[in-house]
Image: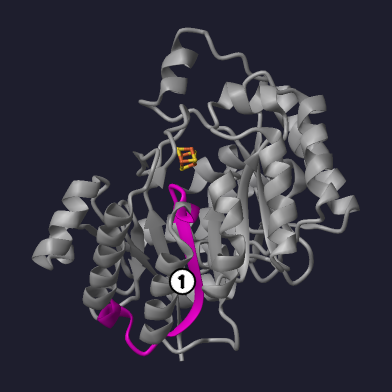
Amino acid sequence: MENVGVYVHVPFCDRVCPYCDFAVVATRVLASEREGLYVDALLAELEERRSAFAGRRLASLYLGGGTPSLLTPASVARLVEAIRASFPAAAAEPEVTLEMNPGTLERERLPGFREAGVSRVSIGVQSFSDATLKRLGRAHAGDEARASLAAARAAGFANLSVDLILAAPGQGPAEFAADLEEALAFAPEHLSTYELTIEPGTPFALAAARGQLRRADEDAVLDMLDACEARLTAAGYRRYEISNYAKPGFEAVHNRRYWLRRPVLGLGVGAFSTDPPRVGMPHGVRRANPRDLAEYERAAARGAFDAAADVEVLTPQIARGEAVFLGLRAADGVDAARFAGEFGEPPRGFWPDAIDACRREQLLDETAAGDLKLTAAGRRLADTVFRYFV
Ligand code: SF4
């Protein structure tokens, strides 16, 4: 039986960080009525949309945001129970991840989240340096991050992921190395290290345009990425995706679905779904929910989620580009036989010149069977490689 992953977007955040481009709503205090209305809407969407994924087993559930840890454990339990009741489990214990920020309130809820069925916590540490956190406009301090990691362990979570930002304003290789060492002291099973990107329309984009954002230059960023890989590899982690590292057996089940383009049912404000292929749509359908909370809840009130969503039928051209782009991000690379099974030919059949050019530059390895992987140099210049294919 095929699998499904479910993503639940919770848009509430204490405040909106100046670099954030997610679908979020600043909510200093999440009132129980507001929370209840939103959870009701999520459950209504689940009810309406689950038939598109009928007959599939639940491989993973990911509560992301926004800040899902602003929900009470009772709300998280409602969601976990309803989703698990909708799809039989693919494994004895499907992965259930909750993203949390290091706030005091959320920390106190960790035992409750565990009782609610959460098996994995992903903590948005970003940095342990108060100066870096301040420059990022984050609501927490380094001590709160430390306390949250300790509290997650104390609550019995044996699968912890830490998010760190790389190339934050004012952060150089020494500052990032210090953050990495602090994270390693907690021995998380998984680490995500994302380079800060400046998204159009954010306060950081405005500051950058005015020359007010002091950031490491490209060479320093590449040094940080190299040093990060070397340090984490030495500590027993595998870089299984460009920005993600895991101890053996702790690769994120849910995130891998995106890189392998497996169906995901996305619920909530701004959530994306990838509906499974069906007759006339062999590469599946992508849906994006409204990014506006009021619009999303109006759709819930009308029972009209389909009408409110942006729907894109994936063409062979889009699907092929994504298969290579996402496949190359993963350490396992692009499996030529799997690719040919979907598109009729291996990648070389569509991009012979691009593959040859990347191989000449030693950015790409190609096996005799046509499988593709980024080389170490290719990982440093991944965006350059991707531009050949999408
Ligand atoms: S906490 Fe995360 S989701 Fe919320 S505003 Fe900040 S960056 Fe965005």
Residue 158, image x and y in percent?
73, 68
Q: Which residue is mark 1?
A: 262
Judging depth in this view, the residue of 44 and 143 nearest the camera is 143
Residue at (67, 56) in percent of width and height: 161
Corner quadrant of residue 370: bottom right
Magenta-drawn segment: 50-69
Q: Quadrant of residue 24?
A: top left
* Residue 232 screen position, x and y as percent: 83, 49
Above or below, comparing residue 164 to residue 241 in the picture: above
Looking at the image, residue 95 sits to the left or right of residue 373; the answer is: left
Residue 235 drawn at (x, y percent): 88, 53
Q: At numbered mark 1, what does the secondary structure look like: helix, strand or loop?
A: loop
The residue nearer to you, when weighing 53 against 324, is 53
Q: Residue at x 36, y 84 (%)?
A: 86
Q: Is residue 82 above or below residue 229?
A: below
Q: Which residue occupies 37% across, 79% down?
A: 82
